[in-house]
Image: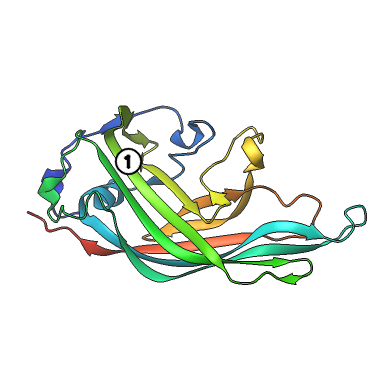
Amino acid sequence: MAFLYPDYFPAGCCVTETDSDPALLRDEFNQFYPVGVSLEQAMAWIWKSRAFTGSGSGLQFAECCGNLSTPPNSPIYHELTFPNSQSTSGYDAAKTKMSEIACGEGYNALFGFEGTDSLQECSGPTGQPISAEAYFGFSLGTVFGFPWPIYLYDEKYYLAVDYTVGSQATNLRDINENAPQGFTYFVGNLTIDGINFPLYSPPPDNCNADPQTNFTSTTSLEREAN
């Protein structure tokens, strides 16, 4: 993907070169720099992408049915459904031009999507579904007093991304396998414009479960290049 308007992303703007893999960075077990992308892609998410469409689904482990002492046991899940919808970051909704976004002043965009959560219990269905949420957000520059650079490592650019799909599939992962609530089990991906961001949940211990969650989002509205 060629980026046609590089003047809005001047050379060196907000970029910090590092000799350490940004994917290993943690902030209270949150993995904010999980994936490296091209410079053009990082630029596009900040300067060009104003709105995204997205949809997805998930089976997120709820509990085990049966005798835990004699596995395999029958799992039940939170069944998540996110119909196709569009999201525009509230903070940036009024910024229709790339020139309105300046590097270093702080960029914090959050794109949220609404879905439903249908829970089956061991004894049967549980009535009406409840609401579920999926979101992802980008941070760049100084946000709430904290610096969020783009890291350059091994010819890839790492942009700070925070994301969650439902209550269990998140970017929370500890490399030492002792994260709070055990968010260490890979369940799928949040895919943004073809780039996969890994999702993790608590492992379904002592149960014959296979939790899965995937969400796909694509830029659907771009800012004007002036």
Question: Please, is residue 131 above or below residue 15 in the view?
Answer: below
Residue 99: give x, y in percent of width and height: 10, 47
Disc 1 crowd rating (10 Å Cα; few below 14, some 14-19, many 20+) is many
Q: Which residue is mark 1?
A: 139
Report the residue that reaches farthest toward the right.
70
From the viewer's perspective, is 98 left or right of 194? left
Location of the C terminus (image quadrant): bottom left
Quarter of the image where one finds residue 121 = bottom right
Of 112 and 4, which appears nearest the observer? 112
Of 15 and 73, which appears nearest the observer? 73
From the viewer's perspective, is 89 left or right of 189? left
Residue at image position (36%, 48%) is: 137
Residue 39: give x, y in percent of width and height: 28, 46
- For mark 1, give the secondary structure: strand
Residue at image position (51%, 57%) is: 189
Location of the N terminus (image quadrant): bottom left
Residue at image position (48%, 62%) is: 215
**What's the amino acid at mark 1?**
Ser
From the viewer's perspective, is 100 left or right of 82? left
Residue 37: give x, y in percent of width and height: 37, 47
